[in-house]
Amino acid sequence: MKSKLSKLIMLLMMTMISGLVFANGNKEASTTTQPEKKKKREISAMLMQSRNFTGLQEMIAKLEAEENIVIDMQVIPDDQYLNLLKIKVNSGVAPDLMDYNVPHIYGVLDPAKYFEDLSDQPWVKRLVNPSISEYNGKTYSYTFLSTSGFQAMIYNKDVFKKFGLEVPKTVAEFEKVCETLKNGGITPILLASDIWVPQIWMTAGYSRALGSAEAAKDFADKILTNKAKFTDYPQVVAAVDEYLSLFEKGWINKDFVTLNIDGVYEALGTGKGAMFFGSTGLANSVEQAFPNGNFGMFNVPTSYDSKDIISGTVFSTGFVVNKASKDKELVKEVLEIFSRPEYAKLYFNDRPGFPALNDVDGGKLKDYAQNVYNDYVLKGKMVNEMNLFLNPLSSLNGSTLWVYYQEAPVTGEMNGYQLLERFQKDVDKFMKEQKAPGWDK
């Protein structure tokens, strides 16, 4: 009996040892088949609130899941962003990556002084429109788009249908649309308080009023060399006056000094307002906020554009790299990863557009955007927005010109001529300080 008990104990012990070895073997096998988790690394970034797109969030999440690289993203309200960006850069506390429109940011901050030169990065060779990212022949930014498309009126088709309205082709028809909507208790045209929104009317309007790329460039060259003043061009003055007339006629929402861009999307999507002058990118934002909405786009008829041309937006959302960053190599690695097609295409999942890289799928444009593109861009009826031509003055916009665009309809104390005359004084002072050609005597 004792012998049988001893044999049983021995058998149980052997079984337990065997089980431990087997379990350990499985553990070893599991370890060898699973890749070792990469060390966590982190960079910082700064982003405008209106550009915290779902696609970008997906790119960032994929980066963390696959590479264990975390982006500490500071999302800043649009109306605070530009001033805060300049303060952080000038005080030496800027994050590793900084978001802004490219190439507009080159007119706000000196790229050679503050931004890392990315010209040697492998993805640069795949850029569809490298000139957007370049400054003095060097690439200082990672861009998502080859172009933002064009600027036009975004409208709620259901509101138009309710009032029996058609897309206006003439100034008289546009006025009739606005009056019908106003009398029906609907805000005809929505405007946001975010400082970059009202200026869309003028950056598109100036170029459209001048009538061609050649005329727009000539205008800008003369303004930037002190050979002409803004007020020397009555058609440019007319673009401001027509914008101001929208307020006088009661076609703009009364809360335009407090309603932010998200509020505009809400009002347009719910039909409280009928139209919003923006871009193809902003149309995507409206669609994203109201995926079941029924929207369209059309070129706004104006008295100062007899040719019926559209304003193109040759800029891109993008990131610049802080030249003072202690993690520049890691930041460059992140941008290289973002440039890979499987990452870059995520940006366009719910925002179809024009990719910066030639091997990235930008998705299918909405039919209404494609129709405008076919009718204007493909037929050569487009001129680039004025911000592109006047980029050296970009650092003035947020503190002077764009503020005047908001101030004038509130106070009623400036017409188009007076507004541009006031801005010209800012330009003169700024250019003298820069000792720019034409002001250096």
Image (cartoon, rainbow, N blue to C red):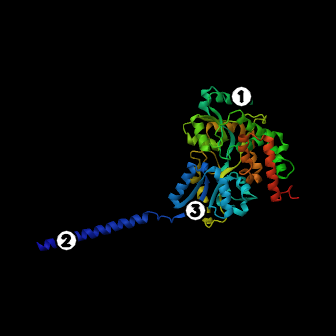
User: In the rendered image, which residue does mark 1 sit on?
Assistant: 173
Q: Residues within 10 Å of mark 2 (few under 14, many from 20)?
A: few
Q: Residues within 10 Å of mark 3 (few under 14, many from 20)?
A: some
User: Quick one: quadrant of the N terminus?
Assistant: bottom left
The tag earlier along the polypeptide, 2 or 3, is 2
Element class at badge 2: helix
What label does residue 370 carry, if any?
A: none
Where is residue 84, by image quadrant?
bottom right
Q: Nearer the viewer, residue 277 or 28?
A: 277
Tell me the mark number nearer the camera, choosing from 2 and 3. 3
The residue under label 2 is which amino acid type? Answer: Ile
For this orientation, the residue located farthest to the left is 1
What label does residue 9 carry, if any?
A: 2
The tag earlier along the polypeptide, 3 or 1, is 3
Residue 391 to residue 270: above or below: below
Q: Position of residue 333 (x, y in %)?
A: 60, 62
Q: Position of residue 60 (x, y in %)?
A: 55, 55
User: In the rendered image, which residue does mark 3 sit on?
Assistant: 43
Relative side of 295 to 392, left or right: left
User: Quick one: quadrant of the C terminus?
Assistant: bottom right
The residue under label 1 is which amino acid type? Answer: Glu
Evaluate whether residue 144 shows in this view: no
Q: Are marks 2 and 3 in contact (CB under 8 Å)?
A: no
Tell me the mark number nearer the camera, choosing from 2 and 1. 1
Element class at badge 1: helix
